Amino acid sequence: MADTLAPIDRAKFSAARCAAEMVEDGMKLGLGTGSTAAWLVRCLAERVREEGLKLTCVPTSARTAALARDLGLRVVALEEAGWLDLTIDGADEFDADLTLIKGGGGALLQEKIVATASDRMLVITDATKEVRALGAFALPVEVIPFGWQASRMLIEELLGALDVMGTKASLRMNGERPFVTDEGNHILDLALGRIGNPRQLSLALNQVPGVVENGLFIDVCDGVIIGHADGRVLIRDALAGTEKEERILFEDTDNIFRDI
Ligand code: 5RP
């Protein structure tokens, strides 16, 4: 069954499967959002079924919550869980410092809150997300609907004075209407091209009235698992300063594909 997946999905699956194997019985886990995180949820559900693992899961979006519940994971709100052992999530870009751009799926606010309420955060990804400099992927910024046009003008003005290549902020659409996040907000996607100073940019964006949060994750991610279509996974641990390679065997994974 894994043979029928596109190479990119095999790569995402490999990273997710590897991360799911690191999860320990009794953990309180943050579950990310997006296609890679969805593979993680399926892999965790399989471990719960097969091994009787007891997990408490805090999802970062309504989408992830629905999938996790459907597959039999125990889902609670962050308010109930309190503090988490580990959050595992995808990313849109990551650099050598493991600074991330997130929010391509529109869930950056819950993702940042959940990740920073965890002892550790791991990113699961395919190799295309690794970049020398962040910014080719448009940076998502969550803004409240009230006066979003004014927030956009202030952001574009601000960007003109910062170390970025582009300054255009576009309102994310969902068909004919503005995209609405789980919190009822909108997303502005900033076409920056290159971000010279992510820390300065993040601080400046969050000062703009109407901005709720931006998609730069700085000093949040502790490690990254990079999956490849042939099952190879590279595990980079920022704290230990190590990198090792493992291999996922697709033959052992048929139960997971039966769920899809
Ligand atoms: C959602 C996110 C996702 O983690 C990011 O967009 C990556 O998605 P995918 O795993 O589908 O490539 O930040 O808000």
Image (cartoon, rainbow, N blue to C red):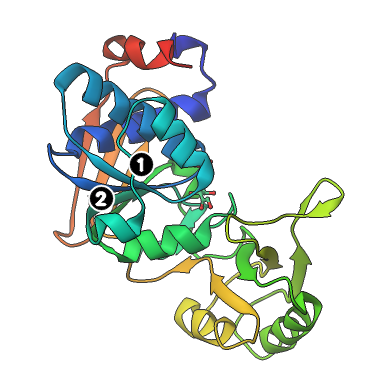
The residue drawn where x is 32% and y is 71% is 219
Question: What residue did someone put label 2 on?
Answer: 236
Residue 92 in the image: above or below residue 160: above
From the viewer's side, name the closer residue of 28 and 15.
28
Q: Is residue 50 left or right of residue 62?
A: left
Q: Residues within 10 Å of mark 1 (few under 14, many from 20)?
A: many
> Is the CB of the residue bearing disc 1 within 8 angstroms of ligand 1?
no
Q: Is residue 243 left or right of residue 136?
A: left
The x and y percentages for residue 133 are 51, 66
Q: Is residue 192 left or right of residue 234?
A: right
From the viewer's side, name the closer residue of 248 and 37.
37
The x and y percentages for residue 55 are 21, 38
> Is the CB of the residue bearing disc 2 within 8 angstroms of ligand 1?
no
Given contact means CB atoms under 8 Å apart, are the residues at marks 2 and 1 in contact?
yes
The residue drawn where x is 51% and y is 60% is 108
User: Which residue type carries mark 2?
Assistant: Arg
Q: Is residue 225 visible?
A: yes
The secondary structure type at the circle numbered 2 is strand
The residue drawn where x is 51% and y is 79% is 202
**Residue placed farthest to the right in the image?**
176
Q: Which mark is residue 226?
A: 1
Q: Residues within 10 Å of mark 2 (few under 14, many from 20)?
A: many
The residue drawn where x is 13% and y is 41% is 26
Residue 164 in the image: above or below residue 67: below
Q: Is residue 98 visible?
A: no
